[in-house]
Amino acid sequence: MSAESRLESLGISLPDVPAPAGAYVPALISGSYVYTAGQLPFVSGELPATGKVGEGHGLVPASDAAGYARLSAINALAAARSVLGSLDRVTRVVKVVGFVASDPSFTGQPGVINGASELLGEVFGSEIGAHARSAVGVAVLPLDSPVEVELILEFA
C-alpha cells in the first residue's frame, strides 16, 4: 500500500502548509533528500497546548505530548509533500529530530517523540519508515509549544 493510501486509510488529511513565520521555507529539496523545517503541532492554525512537558500540576503530560509529536510529524509530512507532490516518492525516512520543552526533572523525551516515529511507521511501513532519531529536551520552544519535529526524507 502506498504512503498516500495509508494516510487515507488512517483517516489523516494533511493540512495546508502555513506561510513561514520567519526567513525560512517549510521544506526544501537538496539532491535526493527533503529537509523539513521544525514543525509545531498546529491544528487549524492553533496550538492545542502550550508549556513544559512533565509530571505534575501545570505541566503537559507526556502522553499528551506524544500526541502533539504525532501532530507535528503530520505537519512535517504536509511540508514534505508540498515540495515532492506526493509522499509516494519517499524511499526512506532517514532521520527524525524531536525537541521537547521539558520540565527540568523530565527525562522521558524518547517516549514523547515516539508519537512521531510511530506515525511514520504507520504511513511508510516498517522498512521505509525505520529511521535514525534524536529526542532532545530543551528549555523552551517557539510560541511555548511543548514539542517540535523535523524530518529528513530520501526520495526517488
Image (cartoon, rainbow, N blue to C red):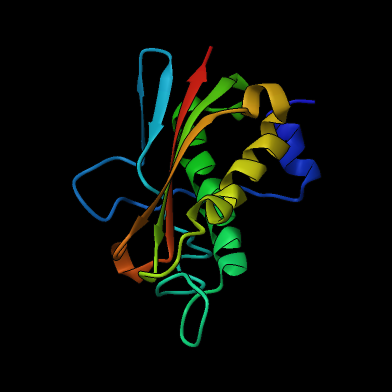
* Quarter of the figure with the N terminus: top right
Query: 79 left or right of 23?
Result: right
Relative image position of residue 8 (x, y in whole percent): 75, 42
Q: Residue at x 42, y 26 (%)?
A: 34
Q: Return the residue found at the far bottom.
A: 57
- Residue 67 in which image quadrant: bottom right
Query: 73 left or right of 139?
Result: right
Q: Residue at x 52, y 17 (%)?
A: 155
Q: Return the residue found at the far left.
A: 23
Q: Residue at x 39, y 66 (%)?
A: 102
Choose between 45 and 92: the one closer to the eye.
Answer: 92
Query: How many numbered discs sit on the rendered protein?
Result: 0
Relative image position of residue 146 (x, y in whole percent): 43, 66
Q: Residue at x 53, y 64 (%)?
A: 43
- Residue 29 in which image quadrant: top left
| Rendered position, 96 above or below 52 | above
Query: 85 left or right of 146?
Result: right
| Rendered position, 47 above or below 108 | below
Relative image position of residue 39 (x, y in whole percent): 41, 50
